[in-house]
Image: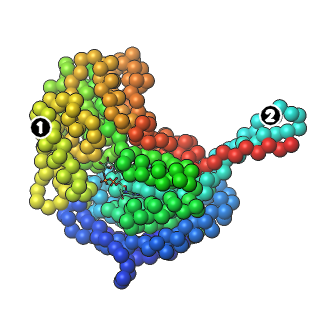
C-alpha cells in the first residue's frame, strides 16, 4: 500500500529497526498510521557528513556528461514508477492522485532540466590589462550541501534541490519533511538505482531543529537550501551565518491577486478558482489576497463561491476527489483561526468556513468578503483553501495594498490593458508575477522571492548557479 521508510546514508537504506527512535507517519485523509519513520542518530548524521565529504571530490571530478546521464536515468525511473509513487505521495500528503502525478512529472522534468543545464557550466576569459596575462572565470561546485524541504510538495521540492546540487557537482544531505517522507525515500531509490555513487545524495529524518543545527554547524557543509516558513528560515540563516555559509531561502508567500475592471472575466474566475484550491491552497505561490475591482467584486465572489461549493472533497486516492484533506491537523486549526478572525473583522462567509467530516483533516473551500485591512487573512499567509476578497477602485491603491505585507514571493493580476499590466509588472514587489496566468514555476524558469519570502533562485540557469562558486584565475 505505502512504502518501506528508511534513512539513506552512505548508499545504504536503513529501515526503522528495534531500539531506534521513530515517529508515525499519518494519512491526512483518515488519521491512520501509514508506517513508522526511523530517526537518524547523531552518530549517523556524522557518518552522513563524512560520506558527503568523501564523495564530494569524486563527484565534482565526474564529467558533467556522466552526471547528466545518471540524472536522466533517475528521471526515467521516476516516470516508470509514476503510478506507485503517486499513490505514496497521495497517501502521505493528501492531494488528489492527478495532482500527485503532475508533481511527479514536474520532478522528473526538473531532473532532466538540471541534467542538461549541468552540461553548460561555462566559464569565461577576460582580456587582462597586461599583455600575455589572462583572467579566467571558473565556476566550481560549492561543496557538500544540506537541504531542508517541507510537506506540501514532497517530491518536487526535494527534486529541485537535489537535482541542482548534483548537476553542479555538489553532494547533498536532504532532510525531507517527517510528515511526508515516503516520496523522498523513493527519489533516493531512483537516484541510486540510476547509478548515483554512494554519499552523493543522502536522506535523514528526525527532530528538525536538532538535525539542522547538527548539519549546518558542521564545517563540512558549505551551502544550505531551505523551503518552509519565514520563522524557521530566519533561524537557519542565523545558524548559517556562524559558518558564513551560502544559503538559498524559499520562505512563505502571501500572493496578492489584482483583478482589474478590464480583466477577461471568465479567464480570471476559471483560472483563479482552479489555481487557488490546488493542493487545498497549501502552495507557497497560491493566490492569497484577492483585490477585485469594485465593478466586478460581487459577481466575482459569487462565481468563485459557486465553484468552491461544487468542488468534490475526499481522500486523494478516490478518483472522483477534486480536493483532498489538509496535510496535517495544524492546518485545520489554522483555517478555523483565520475564519474566526475574519468574522470578527466584518467578513461574510459566502462558501465553506468550517471543517468537514469527523475523520481526516478536511476543510471546506471557503470564500470570505467584506474584510478590512486588519483581518489576519490580509497580513498572514493562510496556506489553505480560503479566498479572502477586498474591493478597490484605483489601481495605485490596489498595488499599494498588494505591497503592504512583508512577504514577496509571487503575485498575480488579470487585466487586458497594456498600461495596467506594465504598472503591475513593475509595481508589485514580488520575485515572480503572473499576468493573466498563474504559471510561475517550471524547471526552466527561476523560482524565488524577495523581502521576507527569502532570496536566491531555484530552477532556471539561476538554480544551477546557486550551487556554484565563482573563482577568478589570473594566468601570467
Ligand atoms: P514549519 O515552519 O514548522 O515547518 C515547515 C518545514 O520546516 C517542515 O518540513 C519542518 O519539518 C521544517 N522545520 C521546522 N523547524 C525546522 C528547523 N529548526 N530546522 C529545519 N527544518 C525545520 O511550518 P508548518 O507548521 O509545517 O507550516 C506553517 C507555515 O509554514 C505555513 O503556514 C506556511 O506559511 C509555511 N510553509 C511554507 C512552505 C513553502 O513551500 N514555502 C511549506 C510548508 C510550510
The mark nearer the N terminus, 2 or 1, is 2
Which quadrant is home to the N terminus?
A: bottom left
Number of marks drawn: 2
Q: Is residue 181 above or below residue 308?
A: below
Callout 2: 10 Å neighbours few (<14), some, many (20+)?
A: few
Callout 1: 10 Å neighbours few (<14), some, many (20+)?
A: some
The span from disc 2 to disc 1 (Cα, nearest Å) is 66 Å
Coloring applied to the structure: rainbow
Q: Position of residue 75 (x, y in %)?
A: 49, 58
The residue at 58%/62% (across/down) is 220
Which quadrant is home to the C terminus?
A: top right
Q: Position of residue 458 (x, y in %)?
A: 49, 45
Mark 2 element type: strand
Q: Position of residue 278 (x, y in %)?
A: 28, 45
Residue 472 figure quarter:
top right
Q: Point out the frontmost of discs 2 and 1.
A: 1
Q: Left or right? Give the position of 171 relative to 433.
A: right
Q: Is residue 451 above or below residue 327?
A: above
The residue at 40%/41% (across/down) is 453
Please say whether residue 218 is visible from this viewpoint. Answer: yes
The residue at 33%/24% (across/down) is 399
Q: Position of residue 161 (x, y in %)?
A: 49, 53
Say which residue label 2 marks: 127
Tag 2 and tag 1, C-beta contact below 8 Å: no
Say which residue label 1 marks: 343
Mark 2 beta carbon near ligand 1 (under 8 Å):
no
Q: Is residue 298 above or below residue 254?
A: above
Which residue lies most toward the right here?
132
Q: Left or right? Give the position of 135 relative to 317.
A: right
Mark 1 element type: helix
Amino acid at each position: 500500500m505505502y512504502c518501506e521508510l528508511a534513512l539513506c546514508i552512505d548508499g545504504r537504506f536503513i529501515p526503522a529497526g528495534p531500539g531506534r527512535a521513530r515517529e508515525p507517519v499519518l494519512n491526512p485523509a483518515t488519521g491512520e498510521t501509514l508506517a513508522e519513520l526511523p530517526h537518524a542518530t547523531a552518530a549517523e548524521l556524522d557518518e552522513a557528513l563524512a560520506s558527503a565529504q568523501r564523495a564530494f571530490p569524486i563527484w565534482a571530478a565526474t564529467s558533467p556528461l556522466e552526471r547528466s546521464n545518471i540524472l536522466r536515468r533517475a528521471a526515467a525511473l521516476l516516470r516508470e514508477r509514476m503510478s506507485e509513487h503517486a499513490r505514496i505521495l497521495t497517501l502521505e500528503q493528501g492531494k488528489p492522485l492527478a495532482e500527485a502525478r503532475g508533481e511527479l512529472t514536474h520532478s522528473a522534468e526538473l531532473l532532466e532540466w538540471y541534467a542538461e543545464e549541468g552540461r553548460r557550466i561555462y566559464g569565461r576569459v577576460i582580456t587582462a590589462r597586461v599583455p600575455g596575462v589572462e583572467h579566467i572565470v571558473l565556476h566550481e561546485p560549492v561543496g557538500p550541501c544540506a537541504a531542508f524541504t517541507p510537506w506540501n510538495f514532497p517530491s518536487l521540492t526535494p527534486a529541485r534541490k537535489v537535482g541542482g546540487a548534483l548537476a553542479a557537482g555538489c553532494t547533498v544531505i536532504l532532510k525531507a519533511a517527517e510528515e511526508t517522507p515516503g516520496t523522498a525515500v523513493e527519489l533516493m531509490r531512483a537516484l541510486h538505482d540510476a547509478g548515483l555513487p554512494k554519499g552523493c545524495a543522502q536522506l535523514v529524518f528526525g527532530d528538525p531543529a536538532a538535525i539542522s543545527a547538527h548539519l549546518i554547524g558542521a564545517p563540512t557543509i558549505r551551502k544550505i537550501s531551505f523551503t518552509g516558513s519565514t520563522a524557521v528560515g530566519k533561524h537557519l540563516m542565523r545558524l548559517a551565518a556562524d559558518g558564513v555559509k551560502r544559503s538559498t531561502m524559499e520562505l512563505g508567500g502571501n500572493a496578492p491577486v489584482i483583478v482589474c475592471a478590464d480583466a477577461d472575466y471568465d479567464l480570471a474566475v476559471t483560472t483563479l478558482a482552479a489555481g487557488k484550491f490546488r493542493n487545498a491552497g497549501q502552495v507557497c505561490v497560491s493566490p492569497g489576497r484577492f483585490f477585485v475591482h469594485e465593478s466586478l467584486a460581487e459577481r466575482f465572489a459569487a462565481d468563485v463561491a459557486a465553484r468552491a461549493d461544487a468542488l468534490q472533497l475526499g481522500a486523494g486516492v478516490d478518483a472522483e476527489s477534486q480536493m483532498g484533506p489538509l496535510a496535517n491537523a495544524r492546518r485545520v486549526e489554522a483555517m478555523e483561526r483565520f475564519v474566526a478572525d475574519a468574522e470578527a473583522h466584518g467578513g461574510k462567509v459566502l462558501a465553506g468556513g468550517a471543517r468537514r467530516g469527523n475523520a481526516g483533516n478536511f476543510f471546506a473551500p471557503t470564500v470570505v468578503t467584506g474584510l478590512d485591512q486588519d483581518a489576519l487573512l490580509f497580513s498572514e499567509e493562510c496556506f489553505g483553501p480560503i479566498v479572502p476578497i477586498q474591493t478597490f477602485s484605483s489601481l495605485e491603491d490596489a498595488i499599494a495594498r498588494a505591497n503592504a505585507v512583508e512577504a514577496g514571493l509571487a503575485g498575480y493580476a488579470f487585466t487586458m490593458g497594456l498600461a495596467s499590466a506594465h504598472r503591475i509588472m513593475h509595481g508589485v514587489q514580488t520575485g515572480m508575477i503572473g499576468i493573466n496566468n498563474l504559471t510561475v514555476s517550471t524547471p526552466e524558469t527561476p523560482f524565488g522571492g524577495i523581502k521576507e519570502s527569502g532570496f536566491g533562485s531555484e530552477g532556471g540557469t539561476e538554480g544551477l548557479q546557486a550551487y556554484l562558486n565563482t573563482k577568478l584565475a589570473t594566468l601570467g
